[in-house]
Structures are given as structure tokens and as C-alpha cells.
Image: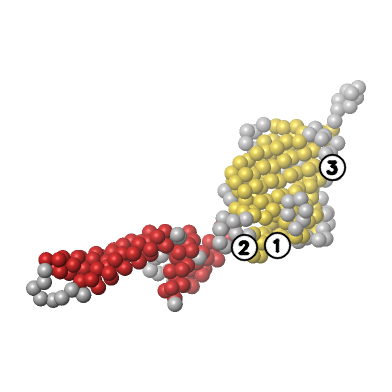
Amino acid sequence: MAIFRAIVNGCRRDPRLIAALTGIAIFGLATLAVTLKAASLPHGDGALLDGFWVSLAASFLEDMAFFILVGVIGLYLSLQKPDEDLFESRIKYLFNASGVNDKLRIFLVEKVAPLGIFSTRYRTSIDFTSYDEKLGAVKAVFHVERVLTNMFKDRSFDRERQGFNIVTDQVGDATQLQGMLLGAWTGGGARDEQFIIEPKEIYGLRHDEEVYVNVPPNGHVVFNYKFWVWYKIGESYYLDTLRYSQNAEVFVSNHTDVNVSLLDNANGQQRVLTPKASHLYNLGEITSGQKEVFMLKEVSRMSVPGSGA
């Protein structure tokens, strides 16, 4: 029964196996017919025709044995499709040295599987909303959107860990509120699943967060989080990612009442964003790690006509 089920599953995976089995059946029936014909002939001196049938039957049997020995083995090898095997089996193909035991393979599965997720789109929107001259910083609202895509067509990611951190510039004294985590959710327009319900205040240098998302086989999920921090004048902004990102971009807009000067990391060019102005940094592909995008060089008040400024 196990062999029969294996044959049925093989036929479902590859229609070529049906054609091959049909050919084997036809060849086998022809061999059986010739053999029975030869066996029914009388023994003895016999006629020339009798000898022909006996010789033909022997030849058929030899060809049949050769076909089974060579043809079936070759067919089996040609029908192998590692990409359709279980993920654990594919790991065995990759790490196939003699010293790799089952415990080590389990470890490898746990380490390799998370690499199956990458970001097809990684967009960060930064909105400067106000300037505090006393703190020497601009209040910046960040909205990070990542389209997490599953590269496996037969393996889902259920409750896959998605960590992120918020690093502050440490403005003011130790009691100063440095920022606030406003939310984290999945979904494009509507929020499919919301992780952070109540805003979380941020004190100190760093805030770490961890949520769990579900990514279907050969599918994707849009993961978002939003926060604000005090962005100190003279500090650089780094895009930080642990996953390969196919298309990364940073969109900066100025909704303060001051001019915001940015120093581009790519070309060293100084860019002045007047109130309501914006700029898009198209970074393209990013493998992993940190990438400096710009430095918040300075802010300046708008000159008033007739003021002599």
C-alpha cells in the first residue's frame, strides 16, 4: 500500500510519471503476450517459426529487464524535485556532510527559516512638527512601513518575531520625556491586527519592542509602527534594518515654522526644507545593518520682509 500511495502521489506531482508508467504497462503486456506464445509452442525439433517465437520472447525479456534496471532508475532521478520537498528535507540537501546529525539539522532549520522573509518595500516617513529652541531639537514623528514577504511557497511563518527599537538623542535632563511609541499594527489601509493599543512613553536612550506577525506561504504582510522623538540638531539619521530590503526610501517633510537644513550623506549636499516642503530619499536595495541618510545640520527662522534679517 505504501508503494501504491507513493506512485499515486508521484503521478499527482508530475504527469510525466503517468506516461512513463503507461509505457511500462504496454511494454510489459507485449512481453507477456510474446512469452505466452513462445511457451505454448511444442518442443522438439520444431519449425523455423517456432524458433523465431522463442528467440523473440527471450529478447523481449532481456529488453524488459534492461529497461527496468536502467530506465526506471533514470526516470526516478529525473523526477526528483527538491524544491517541492519539505523544508526540512531541503535543509538536508544543503547541509549534507557526514557529521551533520538530526539535532544539528533542527538547529539549522531554526536559523535558516527566518531568512525566508525579506522586505519588498521599506518606507520611513519623518515629519518635523515643531522646534524647541531650549532643547535644541525638533519633534519628529516617524511612520515606518515594511512589506514583509515570504519567499517559501510551502511554509508559513506563524507568530514570527518582529523586533524594532527606538533610539533617542537624550535631550534635556534625566526626567525629560524623550519620545512616545504611538502604535504598531499590520495592514495597509485598515489595521488588520493591532499590537500597541495604548501609547508608551519613552525615557532614556533606547526603547526595544517585540511583536509577532503571521506571513502566509508565498504571501506578504504590511507591518507598521509609529512613534515620535526629539531629534537633536547636529545628529545624523540612520536607516537600520536586519533584513534585506528590495526597495528602501525615506520621506522627510517639514511642518514646523522654521527652515530645516539637512546634509545629505550620499553627496554631501545641503538641503533646506522650508515650512511645508518635503523631500524623498530613494535608497534602493539595502542588505542589512545601518545606513546613514542625512544629518540634521541646523534650523533657522524665516526672514520677515522689512525686518533687516
- Quadrant hosting residue 62: bottom left
Q: Amino acid at mark 1?
A: Val
Which of the image's four quarters has the C terminus? top right
Of labels 1 and 3, the one closer to you: 1
Residue in view at x 80 percent, y 55 percent:
182
Describe residue 281's horizontal placement relative to residue 69 as left or right: right
Verify CB contact (< 8 Å) between mark 3 and mark 2: no
Q: Residue furthest left?
A: 45
Residue in view at x 55 percent, y 66 percent:
110
Q: Disc 3 marks which residue?
A: 130
Q: Disc 1 marks which residue?
A: 211
Of the pair 56 and 146, the residue shown nearer to us: 56
Q: CA distance from mark 1 to mark 3?
A: 30 Å
Could one spot residue 117 in this view of the protein? no
Query: In the rendering, which numbered label is found on residue 7?
Result: none
Query: In the rendering, which numbered label is found on residue 157?
Result: 2
Q: Amino acid at mark 3?
A: Ser
Q: CA distance from mark 2 to mark 1?
A: 13 Å
Relative image position of residue 109 (x, y in whole percent): 52, 65
Marked residue nearer the N-terminal end (2 or 1): 2
Marked residue nearer the N-terminal end (1 or 3): 3
Of the pair 159 and 31, the residue shown nearer to us: 31
Secondary structure of the residue carrying tag 1 is strand
Residue in view at x 69 percent, y 42 percent:
250
Of labels 3 and 2, the one closer to you: 2
